Image (cartoon, grey):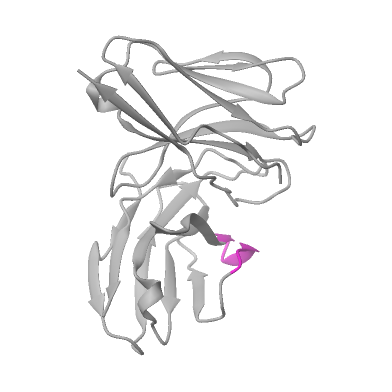
Amino acid sequence: KAGVTQTPRYLIKTRGQQVTLSCSPISGHRSVSWYQQTPGQGLQFLFEYFSETQRNKGNFPGRFSGRQFSNSRSEMNVSTLELGDSALYLCASSLAQGIISYEQYFGPGTRLTVT
Amino acid sequence: LAKTTQPISMDSYEGQEVNITCSHNNIATNDYITWYQQFPSQGPRFIIQGYKTKVTNEVASLFIPADRKSSTLSLPRVSLSDTAVYYCLVGGGNQGGKLIFGQGTELSVKP
């Protein structure tokens, strides 16, 4: 079974621009979560989607948004990029069949650099 | 969400057994204990999950005492490739797919 895939793997943007990152979960997984990882703040939860609905949200500004499609694929968008948004963005999927699962499968991440 | 406390770093040598303990004094009745492993520039990888007593799989064992206020991840006979950051997470139940990662334990395995 293919793992979680994320595209692109690397991205360089300038301040003020916006960016869209994509995540394809493991086949059959309906829950997709997004995380930001930086050396200073560590791994931080952004949001989680299940059945095209945002079910949980972390403490990030409104510039960070996401969505999920009917095939469970998910995208996250960051608008008006700031230097501090430079990070590894990780997507994770899980079965989430009624019981909330802490067994999540992470993708390789998208390394975003904002200059 | 229960807060977890782990050692910041640990050193070991190849072939040794490594035990990483995590404290979670405020664990709730329906919380599970989950451990993840992360290599540099990769996403975390699920290692093991348990609720009470002992759980064992092909890579690790998880020991949870009766009061569940702590847990110990045991890695038998570590190798250089086990050098990574290990995270202990507590939660589950109705808390959504929101994993709260602490600072983790940076394990360094030396030859």
Q: Nearer the viewer, residue B51 or B11?
A: B11
Quarter of the image that includes the C terminus of chain B:
top left
- Residue A49 screen position, x and y as percent: 56, 61
| Dominant secondary structure of the residues highlighted in magenta in the image | strand
Q: Nearer the viewer, residue A66 or A38?
A: A38
Residue at 28% across, 49% down: B41
- Residue B45 screen position, x and y as percent: 40, 37
Say left or right for B65 vs B20: right
The stretch drawn in magenta includes residue A24: no
Say left or right for A105 vs A101: left
Residue B106 quadrant: top left
Q: Nearer the viewer, residue A90 or A94?
A: A90
- Residue A17 screen position, x and y as percent: 33, 88
Say left or right for B32 vs A66: right
Give the magenta range: A48-59
A88 vs A97: above or below: below
Residue B29 quadrant: top right
Most distant residue in the bottom direction: A16
Residue at 55% across, 33% down: B6
Residue at 26% across, 80% down: A115
A42 vs B30: above or below: below
- Residue B86 screen position, x and y as percent: 44, 34
